[in-house]
Image: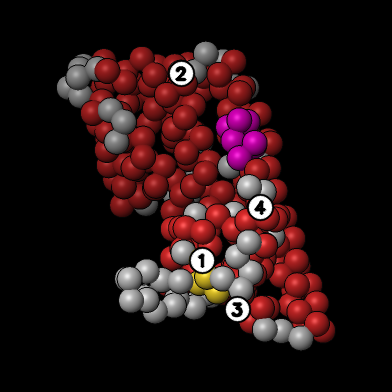
Amino acid sequence: MSSTRFVAARIGAVLTIGQLAATAGVTVRTVRHYHQVGLLPEPERDASGYRRYPAQAAVDLIRIRTLADAGVPLSRIDALLHAQPAEFATAISDIDTALQHKIDQLAEYRHRIAELASGESLFLPAEVVTLLNRMRGLGISEQRVRLERDAWILVQALDADAIPQRVREKNAEFDDPETTRLYRAVDDSVDWHPHDPRLDRLIDDLDAWEIAHTRGPTRSTELVASRISESSPAWQRIVNALTHRAEQRAAET
């Protein structure tokens, strides 16, 4: 039987919940949900224990389903079902505006998700990404590059205005072969025992470099030192030793 004949056969009659759902093209579960949220009245059970629905319930259910399928929030459907034509048009216009805003927001989310494929550029300025790629080109380990990346993310959050100057300074440092050598030496020490005697010489070399490239401590550099020292016991010893020597020099001045 076609849906038209199905409905016509029941005009003036009553429907079970299954027949009502089939008429409107929804599931019985959906009908019961509309009962729960107050969109469709739920009739009392008859003497045989069944709930019987008039044909008007099918009409109302089709209108509810049509509005819901169009994206109208369930919380607004009841008011629309009872609205005058002018009120209905205004409400639909408002809903359309809200849906367009949601579409724009989702489009922005998709754009940002697509940018995830570009990795570091999602979080950092282009000049920082270029610097990180330069480090890779110099043979510095990916682990150390990732730590540098995290450091720049902290700088971005805590002192973004300092980034252009810091990028210039870092590029100048990497123009110096000694800086590159020390970066690679630190890479090599990542798995050393913290009491490996080779660390003593490396700490001396790094301390000399620090003295030659002294900059005042900042909150971001303190966080960076903490982040680096978490990565390796040997690196933790390096950071602790350099911090202790810097504090001693500060106390002597």
Vertical order, 103 against 53 (above or below)? above
Could you tell which of marks 3 and 2 lies nearer the N-terminus? Answer: 3
Which kind of residue does numbered mark 2 sit on? Ser
Q: Residues within 10 Å of mark 3 (few under 14, many from 20)?
A: some
Q: Residues within 10 Å of mark 4 (few under 14, many from 20)?
A: few
Q: Which residue is mark 3?
A: 78
Q: Label 2, secondary structure: give it.
A: loop
Q: Label 1, secondary structure: give it.
A: strand
> Is 102 covered by the magenta stretch?
no
Mark number, residue 141? 2
Could you tell which of marks 4 and 3 lies nearer the N-terminus? Answer: 4
Q: Which residue is mark 4?
A: 3
Vertical order, 92 against 129 (above or below)? below
Q: Which residues are magenta?
A: 113-119
Q: CA distance from mark 1 to mark 4?
A: 14 Å
Residue occupying the point 44% across, 58% down? 29
Q: CA distance from mark 2 to mark 4?
A: 69 Å
Tell me where residue 13 appears, x and y as whole percent.
Answer: 56, 71
Could you tell which of marks 2 and 1 lies nearer the N-terminus? Answer: 1
Q: Nearer the viewer, mark 2 or mark 4?
A: 4
For this rendering, which residue is in front, 173 or 54?
A: 54
Furthest-left residue in view?
Answer: 195
